[in-house]
């Protein structure tokens, strides 16, 4: 039982570490995505304005605006991809491994406890059957244990009566 409690504590600690690591990872991803959005908006307003004025003379107002908007969208997409592929870190991997080991230990101990209960159940059923058989048929239950002593007494009595006749 102590091992099971120890494994439950390890499992609880591992789960809390996994939750903390995942929360940190999620916050980091949200921060990167927010930066990507801010960068996209800032780039949209500032670079669009500067590049528009520069490209307007070469390509005209429509082509200059299209080129600048496309470049900003590509930059935002690249940042989203980088945010999605951010590594989880060694801490998360270690916590998941410890949690899985604790779960395996709990499963092993639970199977052992289950086997012990099955053995106890079978023992109780055997006692119940023996008591039930004795209550239903007391002579049948006691007869095998009484045969040898009774046979010995009968043989002694026969020898005695045979000795008395001679």
Image (cartoon, rainbow, N blue to C red):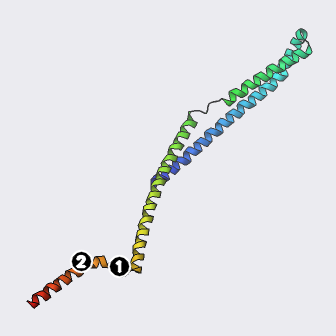
> What number of labels is visible?
2
Above or below, 165 relative to 33: below
Name the residue located 43 percent from the left edge and 59 percent from the top edge: 116
Task: In the rendered structure, find residue 77 and report the number of the disc placed on it.
Answer: none
Q: Nearer the viewer, residue 129 or 64?
A: 129
Discs 1, 2 touching: Cβ within 8 Å = no
Distance of label 1 from label 2 (alpha carbons): 14 Å
- Left or right for 4, reference 88: left
- Quarter placement of the C terminus: bottom left
Residue 154 in the image: state x and y as whole percent.
20, 84
Which secondary structure, mark 2? helix
Q: Nearer the viewer, residue 97 or 123?
A: 123
Q: Crowding at label 2, few (<14), some or many (≥20) Cα neighbours within 10 Å?
A: few
Name the residue located 54 percent from the left edge and 47 percent from the top edge: 11
Which secondary structure, mark 1? helix
Q: Residue furthest top?
A: 58
Above or below, 102 relative to 158: above
Task: In the rendered structure, find residue 140 and report the number of the disc placed on it.
Answer: 1
Residue 107 in the image: state x and y as whole percent.
50, 50
- Residue assigned mark 2: 148
Residue 110 in the image: state x and y as whole percent.
49, 54
- Left or right for 151, reference 6: left
Above or below, 159 relative to 33: below
Q: Residue furthest bottom?
A: 165
Q: Crowding at label 1, few (<14), some or many (≥20) Cα neighbours within 10 Å?
A: few
Q: Residue furthest right?
A: 61
Indicate which disc, 1 or 2, sits on the residue closer to the N terminus.
Answer: 1
């Amino acid at each position: 039982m102590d091992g099971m409690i120890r494994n439950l504590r390890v499992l609880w600690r591992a789960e809390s570490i996994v939750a903390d690591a995942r929360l940190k990872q999620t916050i980091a991803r949200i921060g990167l995505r927010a930066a990507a959005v801010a960068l996209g908006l800032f780039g949209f307003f500032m670079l669009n304005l500067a590049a528009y004025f520069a490209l307007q003379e070469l390509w005209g107002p429509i082509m200059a605006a299209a080129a600048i908007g496309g470049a900003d969208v590509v930059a935002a997409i690249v940042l989203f991809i980088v945010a999605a592929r951010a590594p989880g870190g060694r801490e998360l991997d270690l916590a998941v491994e410890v949690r899985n080991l604790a779960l395996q230990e709990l499963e092993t101990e639970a199977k052992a406890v289950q086997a012990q209960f099955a053995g106890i159940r079978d023992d109780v059923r055997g006692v119940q059957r023996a008591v039930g058989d004795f209550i239903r048929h007391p002579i049948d239950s006691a007869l095998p244990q009484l045969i040898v002593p009774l046979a010995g007494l009968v043989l002694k009595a026969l020898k005695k009566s045979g000795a008395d006749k001679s």
